[in-house]
Amino acid sequence: MIGRSPLPQEYLEWNRTWGAPYGRGRSALVSLRERLRAPDAEAYGPFAFQPERGLKTFQYPWAYFTAAPRPGMRAMLSGAGLGGLQFVLAMEGLDVVNVDPTVTGPAVEAHARLNEAFGTDVRLINDLRETGELPEGSFERVFLLSALDHLDRDTGRAVLSYAAGLLAPGGLCLLTSDLLLHLRPFGVLDGGEAERNIDLYELTKDVGLEMSHGDPRELNGFPEYDPAHVVQALPELYVGPYYPSVSQNLVLHRPG
Amino acid sequence: MIGRSPLPPEYAEWNARWGAPYGRPAAQEWEVADRLRRLDEIDPDAFGPFAFQLTSDTRVFEYPWAYHALRPEPGMRVLDIGAGLSGLQFVLAMQGCSVTNVDPSAKNGEWGALSAAMWGLTPENHRRIGDAFGVEVRLIPETVQDAGLPPESFDRVLCLSVLEHLDQAEARAVLESAAALLAPGGLVLLTVDLFFDVRPFGVLPANSYGSNLDIYACVRDLGLELVQGEPRELLGFPQYDVSHVVSLVPDLLISPRYPCASQALVLTKPEGGSR
């Protein structure tokens, strides 16, 4: 399915509770450097430390409520950067790992600072060689929130296959992908390497997971995908306020 | 016309000279959220006049285009509509122009308070930037329609990437005022964003920033004549050709942060009335 507007009331309340997706209060008026240095960095909320383009307003609460997290669960987030969801899950008692090779240099210190500020112990793996330490079948939840959109087909499939292997039987993979409305067939631009609408069918088929949630008519690349249906649904869709995109969402599970 | 990429060399040189459109390198070292603090520590040489306003990427074309089309001269009377804290008004004042900026976002009130908090747009900040660069630009915190300016009192009227944020009727009202304020023989210089996610190029009726305006409906029958601008590339003109614009896409300067380009045109008020 594609995210709808208006957001369900529980999503709005969740966003309010956590200051998602942009951070609380005056976050936008204080530089990231200052927010991180602040003795009360936690006052900005866990979502104040990663820039967002707007779709996360829907994606974060969707992922949270669909995942139905419980204390003690093990969760892996891929490409979560300094995003707030990893800290929220950890604050709620989950055992959280963030695999993100783009978190390097000062961002590593920032991640540690946020763990300190929120009293959490999210493990950051930024060296992909270390991912071998994660046992197969050891996670109940895997989150891939718009994390595969910038990868080429083979790399995206490799990441998803790896994530599938990490899932415990019955575990869920929460996946979102941005659908860009200025690119063909919706607009006149072709996009390119850096910006494209990925083929979700090619990405997800034969990786050992089954779709348990998602409307194939609204998932780019699926045989049932219907751009005309998407256009017709536009008045109901949640369109990103800062970039012309909607969020395709699906849940994959590892058969028990 | 629609702004092309790469920029003409003289545009690139002009941007380098003035640090347009984002400010000079020293200003860019500051995080965006720190831009308001730049106003407390203005270093005119290090920052340049363009360091104080968040700006869209199409300005990399619009500012030098407007400057070169405007052909500033000392004593020239320039009206800049909706200029906020942008640098061009100060550059023109440094060239000896007499510059007036009408911008209702600088007004007190709810919208003005938001502008002050988010953009730093207050009369005080505007004055401080002018002082730092040794120039005086008059700021009128009103719409151009309500600014109370005398008719035909400007040689140039600038309105850069403002109209697309307004509805069709208000955009027309702004240009009616611009036409009335322009002296015979003067020029109106317009840029209007062209959004590729919005009809007729995309599937959205509008986006968070505005819509694709019918420019022709805004400027027709105002007693102005088009002197620069390709009607095939200006939305709403009888000669407008969507497929031609699409064919130009590889050559257009499209913002990397939002899929839009910049339509640019110059209109004149003929001496002795329009033909």
Image (cartoon, coloured by chain):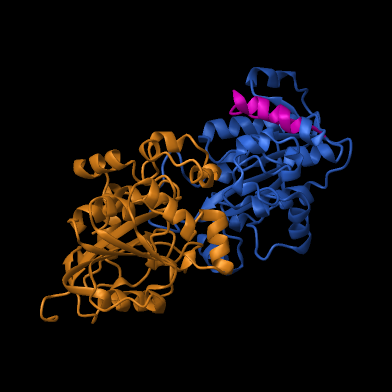
Q: For residue B271: magenta?
A: no
Q: Give chain B's shade.
A: orange
Q: Is residue A106 magenta?
A: yes
Residue A225 visible here: no
Point out the residue furthest to the right here. A71
Residue B251: horizontal and vertical position, in percent? 26, 48
**In the picture, which chain is blue?**
A
Q: Is residue A248 left or right of residue A96?
A: left
Residue at x-position 47% and y-position 62%: B209
Q: Position of residue B34 (x, y in %)?
A: 54, 42
Using the rendered view, name the quadrant where residue B19 is placed.
Answer: top left
Quarter-of-image position of residue B159? bottom left
Q: Is residue B115 visible?
A: yes
Q: Give, as a single range, the part of the protein colored magenta.
A: A95-115
Camera-side residue of A11 and B200: A11
User: Horizontally, is B202 left or right of B192 in the view?
Assistant: right
